[in-house]
Amino acid sequence: MRVSEERREYYRILDRLPLYHTAIPEPDTEKPPSDHEAMLVHMEGELSDAINKVFRADPVIGQALGLINRKIDMLGSMLPGQSAAEGERHVPTPVSLSGSGVAFDSDESFPVGTRRRLSLLLQPSQVPLQLNCTVMANEPSENEDQSRRIRLGFDEDDVAREQIIRYVVQRQGMRQSEMLADESGDSR
């Protein structure tokens, strides 16, 4: 199926995220997320839903709860043991991100169909999100340098996909709120 013929299943955002990726050795012996990680993702989802309901009823309280949640995420990322694995260097990179995959420019070239292990630091928590991916496209970048546009499709990982979808929806909501605030500020 050609890219132009693909049906969009997820919203996509342009963002700048720290990322790191490596080749996945064959055979893939990756372990599934721990019960602890799955429980945190589930709790984050429930909390986001509750904050959204409060926001609809009282935007000021909803915004305050959202800020408290983000502050807790940031504080948690500063705890010892929350940093990336030894040797990983997450580089802030402009990305096009959705629940189905990510695209970014790279100085390296990877054959279509090869597998990569991707680590993203979603903002503001900075806790690494690990995903197994398949290289879906490797094309010349639109930039004038010699970089390549790499498109990675996420393997089936419902926990990680849910985190990314929530992140994308949250970022879109924040951007829409900022646009509305800018518009209301301009009309004064």
Image (cartoon, rainbow, N blue to C red):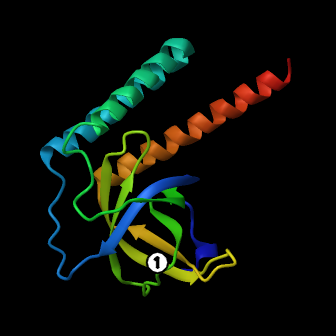
For image coordinates 69% across by 78% down, the residue present is 144
Q: Nearer the viewer, residue 83 or 70?
A: 83
Residue nearest the observer in this picture, 24 or 38: 24
Q: Looking at the image, which residue sits at the far bottom? A: 111
96 shown above or below 179: below
> Which residue is more in the foreground, 134 or 148?
148
Q: Residue at x 38, y 56 (%)?
A: 120
Position of 38 with respect to 105 (left or right) is left
Q: How many marks?
A: 1
Q: Is residue 157 left or right of residue 103?
A: left
Q: Position of residue 10 (x, y in %)?
A: 51, 55
The part of the image, by quadrant, that contains residue 7 is bottom right
Residue type beneath disc 1:
Met
Q: Is residue 113 above or below residue 119?
A: below
Image quadrant where one finds the C terminus:
top right
Choose between 94 and 55: the one closer to the eye: 94
- Relative to 65, residue 169 above or below: below
Disc 1 target residue: 136
Q: Position of residue 32 (x, y in %)?
A: 17, 58
Spot the residue most to the right.
Answer: 187
- Compared with 173, 161 (above or below) is below
- The location of residue 21, given as percent across then percent down, is 35, 69
Q: Secondary structure at mark 1?
A: strand
Within-10-Å neighbours for mark 1: few <14, some 14–19, many 20+: many
Residue 73 seen by the camera: yes
Across and down, in percent, residue 150 comes to: 50, 75
Q: Residue at x 64, y 30 (%)?
A: 177
- Residue 9 appearing in the image: no
